[in-house]
Amino acid sequence: MGSPLLWNACAAVVLVLLSKGSVSHGAEFGHLPDNITVLEGESVTLRCRIEEEVTHRAWLNRSNILFTGTDKWTLDRRVTLANNNDSDFSIHVDRVQVTDEGTYICTFQANNKPRITYVYLIVQVPARITNISKSLTVNEGDNVVLFCMAVGRPEPTTTWKDQEYGLMSEGEFLDITEIKRQQAKDYECITNNGVAPPDQRKVKVTVNYPPMITDMKNMPAHLGKTAILRCEAMAVPPASFEWYRDDHRPVESDNTLRIKNEKTRSLLLFTNVTEKHFGNYTCFASNRLGASNASMLLFRPGAIQGRGTALRAGASVAVWFSLVVVFLLKV
Ligand SMILES: *[C@@H]1O[C@H](CO)[C@@H](O)[C@H](O)[C@H]1NC(C)=O
Ligand SMILES: *[C@@H]1O[C@H](CO)[C@@H](O)[C@H](O)[C@H]1NC(C)=O
Ligand SMILES: *[C@@H]1O[C@H](CO)[C@@H](O)[C@H](O)[C@H]1NC(C)=O
Ligand SMILES: *[C@@H]1O[C@H](CO)[C@@H](O)[C@H](O)[C@H]1NC(C)=O
Ligand SMILES: *[C@@H]1O[C@H](CO)[C@@H](O)[C@H](O)[C@H]1NC(C)=O
Ligand SMILES: *[C@@H]1O[C@H](CO)[C@@H](O)[C@H](O)[C@H]1NC(C)=O
Ligand SMILES: *[C@@H]1O[C@H](CO)[C@@H](O)[C@H](O)[C@H]1NC(C)=O
């Protein structure tokens, strides 16, 4: 295969010029450069410096002839003759592809002796995320697997990070068993191969859980004054609230009582406390994962210091949290 001109090994000097876009940043490799590294999509000039009078000359890609002198053998339009004179024989490859990676050979005949030089073209591709889990919503206790697919040359490393705690795991998959509500956050996948700045993307994980009432207090109230009962609940998605009186009668707004629902809490606003307002109120918070309730008293301060019934009753309220009696009215 091929002419003897091409296949007899000998030393020659090859000068390599890399060009990035239109800007040429020449790099002289002195004698026998083994590797030339170029980014995919950029262009490269393979330069062969000739120091003596030569008769025949050729550039090959592996065993395929690209040019012999000014004769172009390859059909690839990206390959052109960059220079061909007595001291320099260079070819240019435009928009370098991954498949261009490999050995290129400059060979020529001087004083009837064939000379040959090898150049190994390395094509790099910046690390890039090609597919990643979509942001998702799960229920507390579910097992979650996030994936992050990346490509690049050389092969990139892929890691998962948590903004608070940093590195969580290496590899394309992140496993979270029995996810907890505290693990609802953005998870970041980072891929890097040192060729270009790392590529990174985030996945938002939302964890649903049933309401948990975190704040409720028995409240003292004075006739003719204002008063507030408050029920605070943590929940995802946010809870909806309902209020009931001792006998499970729903509490309804009227000209002395207003229900104010906010994202994480519900307020009972008494604008003018009267006798009928004193009593036991139950806050019921629910979302599609479950419900929770807590009861609290609107009481007359004197009643506690006096017979103490309201206080004892308050202490026995069947709720998950201890109740605190406050004598100051605060929102
Ligand atoms: C050229 O690259 C190969 C593999 O990528 C490596 O083993 C070799 O040491 C490199 N040669 C030089 C001169 O850098
Ligand atoms: C050959 O071309 C190169 C690049 O254009 C130039 O630097 C060099 O002087 C030329 N040599 C001769 C002998 O013409
Ligand atoms: C080099 O050869 C490979 C394999 O035949 C081919 O895919 C690639 O396009 C060639 N590149 C150039 C610049 O000739
Ligand atoms: C990404 O991966 C998912 C799951 O493997 C797959 O269903 C989807 O088609 C992929 N998307 C793309 C753009 O490759
Ligand atoms: C509160 O209600 C009582 C009895 O209904 C009424 O006499 C009083 O004027 C009201 N006070 C205010 C501030 O509305
Ligand atoms: C209120 O919560 C208790 C547990 O704290 C539960 O036993 C009860 O069934 C709940 N009531 C309602 C109406 O959901
Ligand atoms: C308030 O009502 C709830 C629900 O009906 C009940 O479980 C609780 O014992 C009551 N508290 C008092 C102090 O009566």
Image: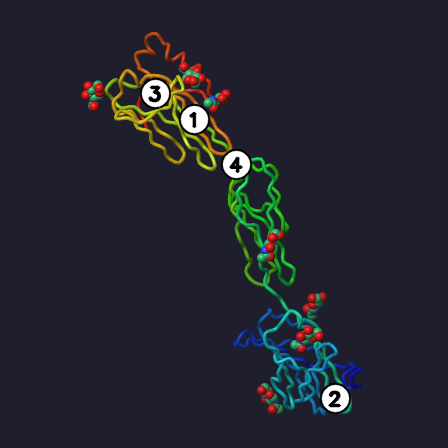
For the point 60% across and 76% down, which residue is it? 44
Q: Which residue is mark 3?
A: 219
Report x, y in % for residue 12: 71, 82
Q: Is residue 47 above or below residue 266?
A: below
Which sits earlier in the primary sequence, circle 3 or circle 4?
4
Front label number (1 vs 2): 1
Determine the secondary structure under disc 1. Answer: strand
- Judge whether residue 317 can be spotted in this image: no
Q: Which residue is mark 2?
A: 109
In the shown orientation, is residue 215 left or right of residue 88? Answer: left
Determine the secondary structure under disc 4. Answer: helix
Which sits earlier in the primary sequence, circle 2 or circle 4?
2
User: Looking at mark 1, is its residue's CB closer than 8 Å to ligand 6?
Assistant: yes
Front label number (1 vs 3): 1
In the shown orientation, is residue 238 left or right of residue 169? Answer: left
**How far apart are the alpha carbons under marks 1 and 3?**
18 Å
Q: Mark 4 Cα within 10 Å, few/some/many (few <14, many 20+)?
A: some
